[in-house]
Amino acid sequence: MRLDDPPYLNTKVALSRNYHREDFNSYVEMLINVYRLAYDVLKPHGRMVLIYHEESQQRLKEMKKAVEKAGFSLEREVEGLMKHQRNIGSRYVVKGRQFQILVCSKT
């Protein structure tokens, strides 16, 4: 999927570090590259919404830094706990109840 193909509002990119079996630093570098692509195709003042599901607060910080390294500014953060955990996809999916939603804007 290319990020510049319409419909723009329905574009979804999912990266799974379990699928790629890379170390976390390589995963963050992949995130930065994807976010830069999104930044390039967004109109001025455009927004990108990210949903992270990660239990490690340190990893969440690194993933948020990736957004800023790509040029976005964080407009809003929402943290919460899921009521139910569903296993979707591989049995090696990260499990946990914490999630974080980031609203990022192109400056």
Image (cartoon, helix red, strand yellow):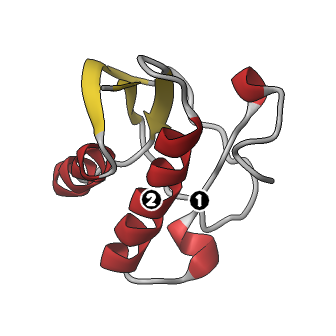
Residue 95 shows up from this direction: no
Q: Nearer the viewer, residue 107 or 74?
A: 107
Disc 1, disc 2: CB below 8 Å? yes
Figure check: 48 above or below 71:
above
Check residue 31 in the rendering and tell me which mark sits there, or answer none: 2
Mark 2 burial class by Cα count in 10 Å: few <14, some 14-19, many 20+: many
Q: Vertically, is 11 above or below 30?
A: above
Residue at x 27% of width, y 17% of height: 75
Name which residue lies at 59% across and 39% down: 41
Q: Position of residue 98 (x, y in %)?
A: 36, 34
Residue 41 lies left or right of residue 55; in this view the side is right
* Residue 8 point in image, percent of width and height: 73, 27
Horizontal side, residue 49 vs residue 104: left or right: right
Q: Nearer the viewer, residue 3 or 74?
A: 3
- Point out the tag, 1 or 2, that comes first from the N-terminus: 1
Front residue (pair 17, 32): 32
Instruction: Pick the quarter of the image with the C terminus.
Output: top left
Q: Amino acid at mark 2?
A: Leu
Q: Which residue is mark 1?
A: 15
Q: Quadrant of residue 12?
A: top right
User: Alpha-carbon neighbours of circle 1 within 10 Å: few (<14), some, or many (≥20)?
Assistant: few
Residue 64 locus on image (x, y percent): 26, 44
Residue ID at (38%, 70%): 29
